[in-house]
Image (cartoon, helix red, strand yellow):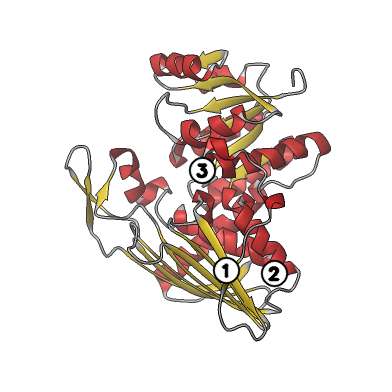
């Protein structure tokens, strides 16, 4: 670290689009604890343009050059999922801490291997499960912990996957091929079900699932090309958590004219309802309602200001990532593990694998 700041190298930065530009760079630039010192793009011209635009000292075409940079303490991986394993493992072996976007690996086995590698090299290993860091999610987690609903009896979830609709942008067409590990089940559904486990401080221990691709094709917006939709655009599960709480969930492709995200938590003493116009809480626009005891009507529950830690000027999406970085900065300083870790990622990968196995075999799976 130089001047008390954690040096960050971001792999996969485009000057005008992409998750790094939208979420990570604004979050890092707003942080007093981090400094972006290097970036890569496979096109050296794009790398130089991005470095100039975002005022980053070093621009590289090859990730090996970024990993060799002594000013880089933390490597951020924001490229497509099929490249995560190669890049994350290379960063860990170079002795760098890593923040990898979710999914951690292209499937469970890659995630397990990356977790084991991170443990071996004793580096900070963080995954982008940023729904956990939203103010609304942490607010209801504390409400449940403090007994607002009493004992949680059941959870009902409905959501929209955003991808998996009739039209798709060219940059997201790769998500329709299950070999790429980035379909609706791997992203929107995974983020949402992870948030459920987080607020309840419990994990799904068994699951039954049905998956289907009701749409067989999608049209690429820019070219008009028709591409096969091989990843499921319908995900239906029922299950039970370690706590005994029953869970049901249905995710649909695209966006709905109705509920795009609705989480109902039913307890012995009350209810909590979380809604969003988007597919999962990490994207923002989230509302919390609740009622207790004899109250028949739901009331809007304002999130206390203490849960809002990021600067709103950077935008909702960057705010959630900013919260994750704030936790990571504290972890660097104190040696704690408050950010979602590779171990958390493996738990979620195991659940997704169990859902897929249940759908394939028609049998209940234990995680």
Q: Secondary structure at mark 1?
A: strand
Q: Position of residue 268 (x, y in %)?
A: 67, 84
Q: Secondary structure at mark 3?
A: helix
Please tell me whether mark 1 or mark 3 is closer to you in this view.
1
Q: Identify which residue is drawn at 50% across, 16% down.
A: 51
In the depicted view, which residue is nearer to us: 64 or 255? 255
User: Disc 1 and disc 3: Cα gap in Å?
Assistant: 22 Å
How dense is the environment of label 2, judged by Cα within 10 Å: few (below 14), some, or many (20 and up)? many
How dense is the environment of label 3, judged by Cα within 10 Å: few (below 14), some, or many (20 and up)? many
**Is 110 above or below relative to 25?**
below
Q: Identify which residue is drawn at 65% across, 86% down.
A: 294
In the depicted view, which residue is nearer to us: 4 or 246? 4
Q: Which mark is residue 196?
A: none
Tell me, yes or no, if residue 221 can be seen here. yes
Left or right, residue 96 beside residue 154: right
Q: Which quarter of the image is occupied by the N terminus?
A: top right
Residue designated by label 2: 144
Q: Position of residue 367 (x, y in %)?
A: 59, 67
Q: Identify which residue is drawn at 74% across, 68% down.
A: 145
Q: Position of residue 337 (x, y in %)?
A: 75, 46
Residue designated by label 3: 317
User: Disc 2 and disc 1: Cα gap in Å?
Assistant: 13 Å
Residue designated by label 1: 289
């Amino acid at each position: 670290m130089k001047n008390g700041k954690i040096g960050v190298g971001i792999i996969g930065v485009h000057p005008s689009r992409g998750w790094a530009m939208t979420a990570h760079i604004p979050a890092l630039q707003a942080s007093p604890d981090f400094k972006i010192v290097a970036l890569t793009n496979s096109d050296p011209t794009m790398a130089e343009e991005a470095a100039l635009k975002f005022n980053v000292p070093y621009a590289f075409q090859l990730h090996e050059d970024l990993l060799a940079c002594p000013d880089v303490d933390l490597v951020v991986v924001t490229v497509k999922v099929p490249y995560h394993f190669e890049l994350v493992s290379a960063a860990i072996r170079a002795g760098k801490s890593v923040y990898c976007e979710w999914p951690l690996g292209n499937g469970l086995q890659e995630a397990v291997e990356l977790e084991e590698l991170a443990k071996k090299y004793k580096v900070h290993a963080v995954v982008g499960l940023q729904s956990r860091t939203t103010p609304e999610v942490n607010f209801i987690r504390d409400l449940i912990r403090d007994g607002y609903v009493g004992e949680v009896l059941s959870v009902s979830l409905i959501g929209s996957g955003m991808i998996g609709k009739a039209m798709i942008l060219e940059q997201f067409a790769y998500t329709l091929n299950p070999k790429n590990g980035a379909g609706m089940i791997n992203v929107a559904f995974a983020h949402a079900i992870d948030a459920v486990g987080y607020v309840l401080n419990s994990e799904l221990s068994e699951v039954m699932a049905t998956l289907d691709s009701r749409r067989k094709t999608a049209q690429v917006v820019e070219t008009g090309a028709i591409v096969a939709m091989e990843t499921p655009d319908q995900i239906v599960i029922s299950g039970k958590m370690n706590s005994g709480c029953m869970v049901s969930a249905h995710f649909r492709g695209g966006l709905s004219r109705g509920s795009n995200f609705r989480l109902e938590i039913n307890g012995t003493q009350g209810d909590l309802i979380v809604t969003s116009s988007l597919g999962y809480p990490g994207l923002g626009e989230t509302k919390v309602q609740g009622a207790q005891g004899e109250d028949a009507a739901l009331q809007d529950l304002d999130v206390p200001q203490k849960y809002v830690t990021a600067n709103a000027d950077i935008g909702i999406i960057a705010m959630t990532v900013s919260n994750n970085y704030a936790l990571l900065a504290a972890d660097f300083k104190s040696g704690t593990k408050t950010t979602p870790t590779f171990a958390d990622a493996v738990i979620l990968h195991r659940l997704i694998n169990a859902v897929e196995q249940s759908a394939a075999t028609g049998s209940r799976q234990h995680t």
